[in-house]
Image (spheres, coloured by chain):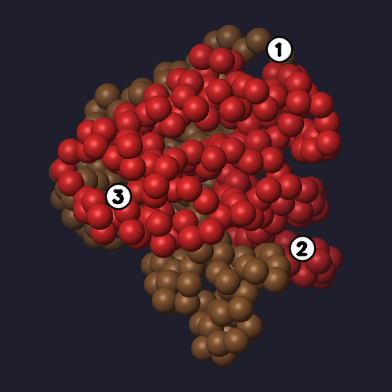
Chain colours: A red, B brown
């Protein structure tokens, strides 16, 4: 557990570090129909005993195409191999891996606190302003706030709210925009037009992936 | 694919609907060390051919404990069985399932657009104000905006930005706060104090789960 914890909370290593040193990588995978794929991808990580720091799977803007965002701390060689293995999956259109310098990323966090505390302690109001928090739900017994930012920022409000009776906390996995991306959206759209959704997807798109997804 | 697409984008069914009708459920799973667990949970869904609409895995506020948020459209009977099966996993502390009425949920979305469009078209500025978007990164060639909300809201800005040269889009999986939760945070804290992190976790906590996690 100690090892896992240090991986979960370790700050990103310096990008100038040696290639054999572990650092934080964000893997972005564009996929078709995800039934079964999720477990195949998950097994690739567990088989190598790689801890997934955060995982986000959500539909993209194009019907039938999902995007996985996977954050791990590993040496580049391992990440590169994993990425190639992920790309071999039939449903995977394209997979990219990036260090933190290559992406713009955010996480969403929600905090549930007793409304009595919020309404009575002016100090809490200052904290909320300081962390740019928004109220999502206000009930007589509880209030839910949200913030968006990097881990340090959402953790900042978390630590500040903890003494005021934090009831529940949840944060999203990382979502990331790749700085160098050009026209992902247009290419996905084009892909969808050329190959409209079908009931069963076999490996018919395999040879078209580079054409569609080259940045 | 048609089936999957309709599941992905179907609005939540009315909560008054019959128990044998599919509706949207959010499963919240509190777990210890997740190596291997992710693939075991993923397999439970793929084996039953259940499409995972969105999946979020991220560390909680307590070191060594993660939270999964899984959204599926299913009949309650299937979800209840799944939930029991998830809870049988050694690393799982507690798993809850909720319909949309029982939770406060949000998603984060990021949109990358050409800066030239943002800086030249006043109409885009109006759209951004209208959708409460924030700028996350502003470069000479691109700008990244973010919004937080339900799917319809983040989709609204997406549709509005598409004609203005959307380059890339990503959204987080759902994160959810359970309305009825009381003192999750305190219980997690207490759990951590009673059972400090250890290198190897076997099933020693199994019999303590209800004590720790009863709402």
Q: Look at mark 3 in the image and give the residue it sits on.
A: A64
Q: Are marks 1 and 3 in contact (CB under 8 Å)?
A: no
Task: Answer whether residue B193 is visible to the viewer in this image.
Answer: no
Chain bearing tag 3 is A
Query: Do the dots labelled 2 and 3 sit on one chain?
Result: yes
Label 3 sits on a secondary structure element that is loop
Q: Is residue B16 left or right of residue A78?
A: left
Q: Residue at x 69, y 40 (%)?
A: A99
The residue sitting at 28% across, 46% down in the picture is B73
- The residue under the point 66% across, 60% down is A147
Helix, strand or loop at mark 1: loop
Tell me which residue sits at (64%, 55%) in the image: A179
Relative to the observer, which residue lies in front, A14 or B187? A14
- Chain on which label 1 sits: B
- In the rendered image, residue B183, in percent from the top left (x then y), is placed at 62, 43
Give the alpha-carbon distance from disc 2 to disc 3, as whole Å.
37 Å
Along the horizontal axis of the image, is B61 left or right of A193?
Answer: right
Q: Earlier in the sequence, mark 2 or mark 3?
A: 3
Depth-wise, is mark 2 or mark 3 nearer the camera? Answer: 3
Q: Which residue is mark 1?
A: B199
Q: Give x and y (percent) for residue B15.
A: 26, 56
**Residue B14: x %, y % from top left:** 24, 60
Which numbered dot is residue A131?
2
Which one is closest to the eye, mark 1 or mark 3? Answer: 3
Closest to the observer, B71 or A180: A180
Same subunit under labels 1 and 3? no
Q: Relative to B127, is B190 above or below? A: above
How far apart in space, not on screen, are marks 1 and 3 (Cα)?
41 Å
Q: Residue furthest bottom?
A: B122
């Amino acid at each position: 557990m100690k090892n896992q914890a240090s991986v979960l909370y370790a700050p990103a290593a310096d990008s100038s570090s040696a290639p054999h040193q572990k650092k934080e990588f964000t893997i972005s995978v564009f996929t078709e129909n995800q039934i079964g794929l999720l477990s195949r991808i998950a097994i690739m990580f567990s088989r190598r005993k790689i801890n997934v720091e955060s995982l986000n799977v959500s539909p993209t803007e194009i019907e039938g195409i999902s995007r996985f965002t996977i954050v791990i701390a590993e040496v580049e060689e391992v990440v590169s191999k994993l990425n190639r293995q992920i790309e071999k999956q039939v449903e995977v259109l394209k997979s990219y891996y990036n260090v933190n310098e290559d992406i713009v990323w955010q996480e969403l966090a929600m905090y549930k606190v007793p409304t009595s505390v919020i309404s009575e302690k002016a100090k809490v109001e200052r904290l909320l302003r300081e962390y740019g928090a928004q109220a999502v739900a206000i009930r007589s017994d509880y209030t839910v706030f949200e913030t968006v930012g990097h881990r340090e920022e959402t953790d900042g409000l978390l630590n500040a709210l903890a003494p005021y009776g934090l009831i529940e906390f949840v944060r999203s996995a990382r979502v990331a925009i790749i700085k160098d991306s050009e026209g992902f959206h247009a290419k996905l759209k084009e892909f969808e037009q050329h190959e409209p959704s079908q009931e069963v997807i076999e490996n018919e798109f395999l040879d078209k992936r580079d054409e569609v997804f080259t940045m």
